[in-house]
């Protein structure tokens, strides 16, 4: 019988536990224990049901392009609960000099692929539009070193595109700034496009042409679950052996001893053959201090930012008065604290009854730190003031919820992938130890699912 400990019950740890549970059910001699410090497994996956609305406190969906989270839902038997974003009404606005400007059609992430809509858009100055045309002649380039997303995008399109698009788009995903994020870790496809094609515009056009020829139906951009993201965590929990799940127990240390692993939590220590650490990097560094100081130091160097989401419910009149589309992003130089707002009732119509508007507002990074010490009421006050300035929304919300996430979003800084290689080498010196979570090769839910699943599969091979 192989005994495996999983430390951390967010989606990464739960995905690892489910993989082990499946192996156990198929007859493999494996026993696992999952330690979770809070009373509720799921980590940042948290959903509240308020006034008929499905309010997401943490992630609200995941990109459909990465299959691992949807595959997990199907393996759990909740594939019928998957819902796609309402892409027919997909429109995103960027606040530009105080006005909401629609992102032009054909913009793939930040790369223009349609001349007319981009040329006519008031989102960009003429200088940037000329840069976009010139970019089509960018020569292939093999970068010797990693660089920031801001430096990379600036080389292709200039600073305006960094400020108006790259930075707000990435802040919405990583809660960090384009100037600090690694292009190789965060936009590996773009770095590869530059190497192979030179121009990102030409590379995207070539990719679009291929897609058109393939006749495959295009899936919705985002996928979620009808009853909210927490239902994914709850379903996994319901499939695990109840005795395998230890909640309210924080692990203090994990160390190797005589070829086995000792997991210490509270006054208890238990022995295992293998351990999966599925924690945010800083917490992983703390528990691994006695296993390898070098590994702990590398883990501790991965930075995290904090974020705050605010769920606001309104009545039918507000729903009718808001612009169509998925919501808006706010570039830093617009002088607001809000970073983004999603019109959830449009993005996922199943999330709110027809007589309700559901908004999800987002603060991240330094802006989240600024409002962090304020009370929930004060934070809602700031959100309402900025919503009034941006979309003219004066109405009193029917409900408002504030969710604070301290140091929950990993920042893949310049050189991140080199650090991950060093971490991997140090980990290999500790047989029977695996790492999973959002610190390594993908911050989104699908990547976390994959990291947990692969860590568990790896344990059964080693
Ligand atoms: C506000 C927000 C919005 C997001 N939006 C999206 C989105 O829309 N789409 C998307 O794909 N991704 C999104 N993400 C990212 C994604 O949700 C996370 O990266 C992912 O869920 C992290 O899962 P995890 O299991 O690695 O970590 P976590 O969810 O952080 O789980 C770690 C767990 O470890 C536990 N723990 C900590 N220390 C100990 C200890 N010593 N002993 C035992 N247990 C411990 C914690 O209590 C926690 O439950 C968002 C993240 C945030 C914060």
Image (cartoon, helix red, strand yellow):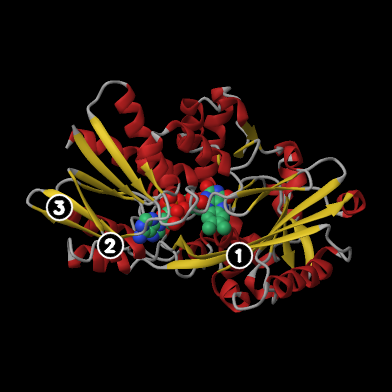
Numbered badge on residue 430: 3
Taking the spot 79% from the left edge, 68% from the top edge, the residue there is: 384
Q: Residue at x 36, y 59 (%)?
A: 250
- Return the disc, 3 or 1, that comes first in the chain's sequence: 1
Q: Secondary structure at mark 3?
A: loop
Q: Does 324 sit left or right of 301 as displayed? A: right
The reply to whether residue 136 is in sight is no
Say which residue label 2 marks.
Answer: 287
Q: How far across and how far down the image is residue 369, in percent?
A: 56, 75
Q: Which residue occupies the foreground of this view, 422 or 248?
A: 248
Q: Which mark is residue 308?
A: 1
Which callout, 2 or 3, points to the residue nearer the camera?
2
The percent coordinates of residue 164 (x first, y second) are: 64, 65
The residue depicted at 48 percent of the width and 38 percent of the height is 66
Q: Could you give the CA–CA distance between mark 1 and mark 2, rounded to whole angstroms? A: 27 Å
Distance of label 2 from label 3 (alpha carbons): 14 Å
């Amino acid at each position: 019988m192989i005994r495996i400990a999983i430390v951390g019950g967010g989606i990464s740890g739960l995905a690892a536990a489910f993989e082990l549970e499946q192996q156990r059910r198929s007859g493999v001699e494996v026993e696992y224990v999952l330690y979770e410090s809070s009373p509720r497994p799921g980590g940042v996956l948290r959903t509240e049901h308020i006034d008929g609305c499905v309010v997401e406190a943490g992630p609200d969906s995941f990109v459909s392009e990465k299959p691992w989270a949807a595959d997990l839902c199907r393996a759990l038997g909740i594939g019928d609960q998957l819902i796609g974003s309402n892409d027919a009404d997909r429109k995103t606005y960027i606040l530009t000099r105080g006005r909401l400007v629609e992102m032009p059609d054909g913009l793939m992430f930040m790369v223009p692929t349609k001349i007319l809509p981009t040329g006519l858009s008031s989102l960009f100055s003429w200088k940037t539009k000329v840069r976009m045309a010139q970019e089509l002649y960018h020569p292939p380039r093999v970068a010797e070193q990693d660089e920031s997303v801001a430096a990379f995008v600036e080389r292709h399109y200039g600073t305006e595109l960094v400020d108006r698009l790259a930075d707000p788009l990435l802040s919405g995903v990583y809660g960090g700034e384009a100037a600090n994020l690694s292009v190789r870790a965060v936009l590996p496809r773009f770095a590869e496009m530059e190497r192979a094609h030179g121009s990102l515009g030409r590379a995207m056009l070539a990719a679009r042409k291929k897609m058109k020829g393939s006749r495959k139906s295009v899936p919705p951009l985002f996928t979620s679950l009808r009853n909210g993201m927490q239902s994914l965590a709850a379903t996994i929990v319901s499939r695990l052996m109840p005795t395998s799940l230890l909640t309210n127990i924080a692990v203090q240390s994990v160390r190797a001893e005589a070829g086995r692993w000792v997991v210490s939590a509270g006054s208890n220590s238990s022995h295992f053959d293998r351990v999966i650490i599925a924690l945010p990097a800083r917490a992983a560094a703390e528990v691994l201090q006695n296993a390898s100081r070098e590994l702990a130091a590398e883990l501790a160097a991965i930075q995290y930012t904090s974020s705050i989401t605010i769920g606001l419910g309104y009545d039918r009149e507000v729903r009718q008065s808001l612009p169509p589309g998925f919501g808006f992003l706010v570039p830093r130089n617009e002088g607001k604290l809000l970073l983004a707002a999603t019109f959830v009732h449009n993005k996922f119509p199943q999330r709110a009854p027809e007589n309700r508007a559901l908004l999800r507002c987002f603060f991240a990074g330094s802006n989240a730190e600024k409002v962090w010490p304020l009370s929930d009421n004060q934070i809602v006050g700031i959100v309402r003031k900025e919503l009034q300035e941006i979309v003219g929304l004066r109405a009193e919300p029917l409900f408002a919820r504030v969710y604070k996430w301290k140091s929950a979003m990993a920042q893949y800084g310049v050189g991140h992938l080199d650090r991950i290689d060093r971490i991997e080498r140090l980990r290999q010196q500790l047989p029977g130890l695996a790492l999973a979570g959002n610190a390594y090769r993908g911050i989104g839910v699908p990547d976390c699912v994959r990291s947990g699943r692969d860590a568990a599969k790896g344990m059964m091979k080693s």
